[in-house]
Image (cartoon, rainbow, N blue to C red):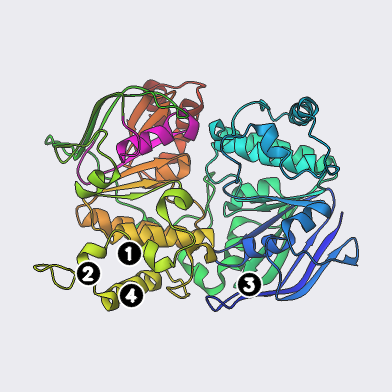
Amino acid sequence: MDILLRNVTKYFPANGVQALAGAHFELRAGEIHALVGENGAGKSTLMHILAGQLEMTTGELLIDGLPRVFQSPRDALQARIGMVRQHPGLVPGFTCWEDAFLGIPRPALLPLDRHLARQRFQELSDRWGFDLDANVKTENLTISQRQKASIVTLLLHQVQCIILDEPTAVLTPMETERLFALLRKLRSDGKAIVFISHKLEETIAVADRITVLRQGKTVATRRSTETNPGELTALMFGDAVDRYQPEKTEPAEPVLPHSMMLPKTEPSPKPKEPLLQVEHLFVNQKDFAYLRDLSFSVLPGEVYGIAGVRDSGLETLELTVTGFIKPLRGTIRLQGIPLQGRGPLAFRNAGAAYVSADRLGKALALRLPIIDSLMVHAHRRFVKNRRFWPRFLDLKAIRYRAGELMSLCGIQGRLESPAEAFSGGQLQRLILAREFAEEASLLVLAEPGWGLDASGRALLQERLSKYLKDGGTVLLFSTDVDELLRLSSRIMVLRDGQNVLELVVPEDQVQRPLIKPQISAAMVGTGTAKEEIREVLA
């Protein structure tokens, strides 16, 4: 299957955004073609058009030389094109095979042969090495398993083109390698694969060709063997690239100049009272990984990073500390206040702000105006008459502040536009801006770099540096070891619900990448120890 998108434009009248302005994209059978660009460049919009989820304003779609028009995802599936989104929308309560067969057409009034359907799903899963159990409920799947289940669903539809939107965003290095092996296998079978990503080193490693979008336009297509992260960054950002430089070592993204790296805060020689103290935490919650006798403390003024796989306790710990899960036993104290089991509001009232890894489920109201999501925690600061009842909000001040946050993020759009009208990277910027504006004593960041391009990561690091200089403290949850090494003062590795490794991050920029293999090994269980890391740094 050969696909050509030519002179594609897309205008959203609801928020006045021109998402695409003459984009081109060519895809061939038996290739992996990466699509890269800064946040808001139009990558997801272009692929949503190809997948039938959006209609183009103007332009052409040619499949094997014939013009096609898609008005729905079903039209695209009938043309053998399907998309795996950043957050696969599987139906809770359904098994893998039940979810997969929801959209499979069959003769009218003919009941589904459940045994045959289950067998067909399992056969496809085994054939492609997915290691999925057809009978597992979708809500019990890890993120990587949800992606695989979505791919099996597309294979059941006999698709020839698979679009993957940010598939490695929260995968461990080992999970990423497994995904790449799968993509190469699909390519060998003649499938055409689109790979959307911000991770340029990964993109070059897996793709055959790379197309760069900037401000809704196609600026270049390169063979992966004939380009490098520096050139791709320059193509993505144009004149703005002066702030960045290409990587000289293994870490995946372009890094900031040394002067913009976060200051490393070694624990003071004088003992400090922990700002956040977690002691002997046990969690046994349905559908979540266990936590077993977990203890750690976060000192004032530091960035304490927690590394791990999402389904090995990282998500459970994030939700327990922030009040969404009640622990079986153990204590969580923020500034001396016991918070275990008291809920997210008590956590915020004790002096915390929180950027959730689940930005669509917990951080935003997707169908409400973006101003509501931006100001959801700030309304109490904009009350006109605090001494009397009824109290009224200063709506003018609220609109002004929300506009300031959008300007700070470099995002154009209307405050009345629904959150779902913005790209994933733009939403992540807005969430980060909202939580930094809280000026809380403790800032909990879960996967803060998810979906951010190089300029977004630069903005994140600038804001973090200022926040720390102003006396803030950060608890960082991440599956990205490069991000942890770049931002953290100390790192704890969580595996199987337990603290398996804790270390101080070297202040020397050269030494940090040297301990990456040991941290990655500890995350996935191939084993390491503090002595091994000391030996590496010696």
Q: Quadrant of the C terminus?
A: top left
Residue type at the position of mark 4? Arg
Query: Could you tell me residue 458's position as x and y percent?
Result: 42, 60
Residue shown at 31%/76% (left/top)?
400
Q: Which residue is mark 2?
A: 382
**Quick one: 398 or 428, which is closer to the camera?**
398
Within 10 Å of disc 4 (Cα), the crowding (few <14, some 14-19, many 20+) is: some
Residue shown at 25%/53% (left/top)?
468
- Label 2 and label 1: CA atoms lie apart by 10 Å
The answer to which of marks 3 and 2 sits earlier in the sequence is 3
Residue type at the position of mark 3? Gly
Q: Which residue is mark 3?
A: 216
Q: Is residue 303 magenta?
A: yes
Q: Nearer the viewer, mark 3 or mark 2?
A: 2
Q: Quadrant of the N terminus?
A: bottom right
Q: Nearer the viewer, mark 4 or mark 3?
A: 4
**Quick one: 377 or 470, which is closer to the camera?**
377
Q: Which residues are magenta?
A: 298-326
Residue type at the position of mark 2? Phe
Residue 510 visible from this viewpoint: no
Q: Which residue is mark 4?
A: 399
The answer to which of marks 4 and 3 sits earlier in the sequence is 3
Residue shown at 52%/45% (left/top)?
251
Query: Could you tell me residue 172's position as x and y percent?
Result: 54, 36
Q: Is residue 335 magenta?
A: no
The answer to which of marks 2 and 1 sits earlier in the sequence is 1
Query: Could you tell me residue 32's position as x and y percent?
Result: 75, 50
